[in-house]
Image (cartoon, grey):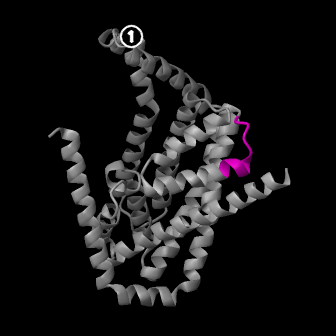
């Protein structure tokens, strides 16, 4: 049995165990969940509404960067349907949405190389701006120790260096023929290297344009506050007296867990890990679990509502023409 089969078997066992444990916790705390939902119906609707705005801001941010950096010719309504379809695919099977988005935008004139380049710019800037904003917010909290603030700042610096210089380091390997010499007889590797050089050149030329930086910063800061506010409202449903320090740290942990592939890809694993980590920060295990589920479920509802809206808008547009 090869390593891939062993890994898949192990992964499926983990998924099965996580889902079983998740259902067990939900069943055990059903009365608590029912009470919270009954008492906070209006808050749930508000969270979904803010999520709808938040997801549209994400869509608009991506669309704006495609327009600026790649002169994307598609219309916003058409793009938004593709965007929300891709998010639905990501909910069902992780990362399939990104592939779907690349295929659909290719049909509308966007080259794969430019798509990959912009995807890197959008993804990395999203992480950096959120981490930067969390650090800035922590700086204003007196109850947070200087050492903790310093550690956060060092994490931000390390992330910045990795994100900014990783493509450059790979390009240096290519430039000095280190990879070319090793794989000189492989046409596939040579083709990948050639495409990477083009993607790297695109990233370098587009990342530091004044307009690109301005759009990334403005959208990034606004989106951060929306995402933080959604998290804050969701935490109020679970515990109304949770401190700002705990909310910010929990938000940061939730943000990081959502972006670790091996964790976010396994249903239930994200929720269980977040719930475990949240215990020292003032939540019971089941409260952390339910908080994460509120964020996931309201987000999914928002994605489906947005998809239906833009699907109908595009359908009406086609009928009129």
Instruction: Using the rendered view, name the quadrant where residue 270 is placed.
Output: bottom left
Q: Is residue 73 magenta?
A: yes
Few, some or many C-alpha atoms within 10 Å of disc 1 (few <14, some 14-19, many ≥20)?
few
Direction front: furthest residue: 319
- Placement of 86 over or under 111, stated as above or below: below
Q: Residue at x 46, y 73 (%)?
A: 294
Q: Residue at x 43, y 66 (%)?
A: 142
- Between 314 and 69, the residue placed more toward the observer is 314
Q: Quadrant of the N terminus?
A: top left
Q: Nearer the viewer, residue 23 or 47?
A: 23
Q: How many marks?
A: 1
Question: Which of these two is toward me, 285 or 239?
Answer: 285
Toward the left, the furthest residue is 1
Residue 137: image location, x then y, percent: 50, 60
Q: Is residue 150 above or below residue 207?
A: below
Q: Position of residue 227 (x, y in %)?
A: 54, 62
Residue occupied by mark 1? 176
Rendering coords of residue 310 (x, y %): 69, 58
Give the structural element (helix, strand or loop) at label 1. Answer: loop
Q: Is residue 319 magenta?
A: no
Please give the range of residues in magenta: 72-80
- Give left or right: position of 5 versus 222: left
Where, by quadrant of the figure, is residue 182 drawn? top left
User: Residue, x 66% and y 33% (percent of image)?
Assistant: 69
């Amino acid at each position: 049995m090869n390593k891939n089969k062993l890994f898949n078997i192990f992964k499926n066992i983990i998924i099965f165990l996580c889902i079983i444990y998740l259902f067990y916790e939900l069943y055990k705390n059903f009365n608590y969940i029912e009470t919270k939902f009954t008492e906070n119906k209006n808050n749930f609707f508000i969270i979904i509404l803010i999520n709808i705005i938040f997801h549209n801001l994400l869509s608009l941010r991506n669309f704006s960067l495609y327009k600026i950096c790649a002169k994307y010719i598609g219309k916003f309504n058409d793009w938004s349907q593709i965007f929300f379809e891709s998010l639905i695919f990501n909910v069902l099977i992780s990362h399939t949405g990104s592939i779907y988005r690349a295929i659909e935008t290719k049909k509308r004139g966007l080259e794969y190389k430019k798509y990959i380049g912009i995807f890197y710019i959008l993804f990395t800037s999203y992480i950096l701006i959120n981490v930067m904003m969390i650090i800035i917010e922590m700086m204003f909290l007196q109850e947070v120790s200087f050492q903790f603030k310093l550690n956060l700042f060092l994490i931000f610096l390390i992330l910045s260096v990795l994100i900014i210089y990783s493509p450059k380091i790979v390009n240096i390997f290519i430039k000095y023929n280190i990879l070319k010499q090793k794989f000189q007889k492989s046409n596939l590797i040579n083709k990948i290297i050639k495409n990477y050089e083009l993607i790297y050149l695109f990233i370098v030329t587009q990342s530091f344009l004044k307009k690109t930086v301005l759009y990334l910063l403005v959208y990034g800061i606004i989106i951060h506050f929306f995402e933080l506010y959604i998290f804050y409202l969701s935490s109020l449903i679970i515990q109304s007296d949770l401190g700002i320090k705990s909310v910010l740290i929990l938000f940061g942990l939730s943000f990081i867990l959502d972006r670790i592939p091996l964790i976010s890809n396994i249903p239930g694993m994200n929720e269980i890990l977040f719930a475990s980590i949240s215990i020292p920060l003032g939540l019971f295990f089941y409260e952390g679990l339910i908080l994460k589920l509120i964020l996931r479920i309201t987000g999914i509802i928002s994605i489906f509502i947005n998809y239906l809206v833009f699907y109908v808008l595009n359908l009406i547009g086609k009928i009129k023409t």
